Amino acid sequence: MKLYTPCLAPSGKKASLPVMVQDGFSWRVLFFGWLGLLTYGAWISALLTGAVTVLLYQFAPSFALFPALLGLHVALAVFTAEIRLWELRLNGWFPASPVAAPSLDLALLRWIDGQAALLSAPEEKCALS
């Protein structure tokens, strides 16, 4: 089972499905670094990390460049979920209770099932009452 944290849209925005953020390690970010963060929509973190990468290429000695980049990629991959949640909070989204499920689709279905009272239409009054 994986743990997903649903992030709900800001109150002024049209009601939509939440963004489900999976907790855990991100292989995409490990291999692609800041470009992997861009694919998740974490623009601020990706651009800051890209700037750090450029600075490392410019100023780090050649023997320390590979370990520094490897450490940066590992740290980003381990904390990808927290980075994404931080970015979503900056954009006004707010996290809800985590949902455990084997896949993203089932996590979304479980979240919707838990919100059934909020999503269902109000019951019509009977004409005879």
Image (tube, rainbow, N blue to C red):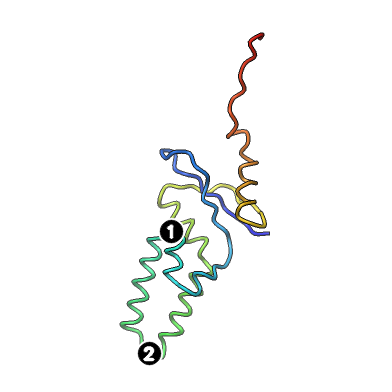
Residue at screen point 59% across, 25% down = 122
Q: Which residue is mark 1?
A: 41
- Which is more foreground, mark 2 or mark 1? 1
* Image height of 44 relative to 59, above or below: above
The x, y position of residue 59, in whole percent, is 32, 83
Where, quadrant-wise, is the N terminus in this rendering?
bottom right
What is the distance, in whole Å, between disc 2 and disc 1 at their CAs? Answer: 31 Å
In screen coordinates, is 38 left or right of 95? left
In screen coordinates, is 82 left or right of 101? left
Residue at screen point 45% across, 63% down = 39
Residue 62 circle label: 2
* Image height of 124 relative to 53, above or below: above
The x, y position of residue 50, in whole percent, is 36, 71
Say which label, 2 or 1, has the lower sequence index. 1
Dot 2 crowding, Cα within 10 Å, few <14, some 14–19, many 20+: few
The total of numbered circles placed on residues is 2
The x, y position of residue 76, in whole percent, is 48, 70
